[in-house]
Image: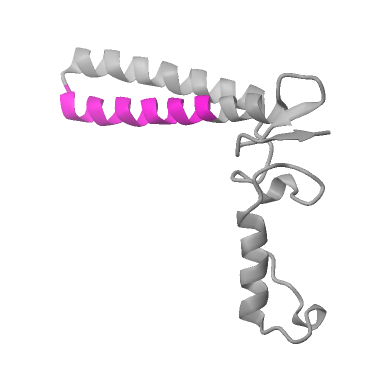
């Protein structure tokens, strides 16, 4: 969290300043002039292309690990590696879906992670 200069808030102690700033950003659920993208859940706009690339990569890794694990009969190791790759795949797909939601369906409107619409 960004530290504020206490001299900008006369009469408030530093803990109250930090709490006020934190409450402001925690209540930010739509990108607007008052709530920049840095204050959203991720803090940035995810890149669609790289998320698709990593989702495909982890999907391929899960399939390859499963095939090699069955061939070599390393069941426990295979299970954990495939589960980890599958979870990474799910994370990449969720980020991709967040990108789609953030950019919206056109018309100058974007849907933020909080599910609310914000007009451009």
Magenta highlight on residue 88: yes
Question: How many labels were placed on the picture?
Answer: 0
Instruction: Tell whether 55 sits left or right of 61.
Output: right
> Residue at 31% of width from left, 25% of height from top?
82
> Residue at 77% of width from left, 27% of height from top?
109
Q: Nearer the viewer, residue 73 or 38?
A: 38
Look at the image and tell me in which quarter the C terminus lies. top right
Q: Main secondary structure of the magenta part?
A: helix
Above or below: residue 4 compared with residue 39: below
Q: What residue range appears in magenta?
A: 74-94
Look at the image and tell me in which quarter the N terminus lies. bottom right
Above or below: residue 77 compared with residue 39: above
Quarter holding residue 52: top right
* Residue 61, x across and y down, in percent: 40, 20
Q: Nearer the viewer, residue 67 or 101?
A: 101
Magenta highlight on residue 67: no
Quarter holding residue 83: top left
Q: Is residue 1 in view from this perspective?
A: no
* Residue 58, x across and y down, in percent: 45, 23
Instruction: Tell whether 33 sits left or right of 74.
Output: right
* Residue 98, x across and y down, in percent: 60, 30
Q: How is the image coloured?
A: one colour
* Residue 85, x across and y down, in percent: 38, 27
> Residue at 37% of width from left, 25% of height from top?
86
Q: Is residue 41 in view from this perspective?
A: yes
Instruction: Tell whether 75 sits left or right of 49.
Output: left
Instruction: Tell whether 10 sits left or right of 113.
Output: right
> Residue at 73% of width from left, 29% of height from top?
110
Above or below: residue 116 compared with residue 100: below
């Amino acid at each position: 969290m960004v530290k504020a200069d206490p001299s900008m808030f006369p009469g408030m102690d530093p803990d109250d300043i930090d709490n006020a700033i934190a409450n402001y950003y925690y209540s930010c659920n739509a990108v607007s002039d008052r709530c920049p993208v840095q204050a959203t859940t991720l803090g940035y706009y995810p890149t669609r292309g790289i998320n698709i690339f990593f989702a495909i990569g982890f999907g391929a890794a899960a399939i390859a690990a499963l095939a090699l694990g069955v061939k070599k009969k390393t069941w426990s190791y295979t299970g954990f590696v495939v589960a980890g790759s599958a979870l990474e795949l799910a994370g990449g797909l969720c980020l991709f879906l967040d990108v789609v939601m953030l950019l919206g369906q056109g018309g100058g409107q974007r849907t933020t992670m909080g599910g609310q619409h914000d007009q451009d």
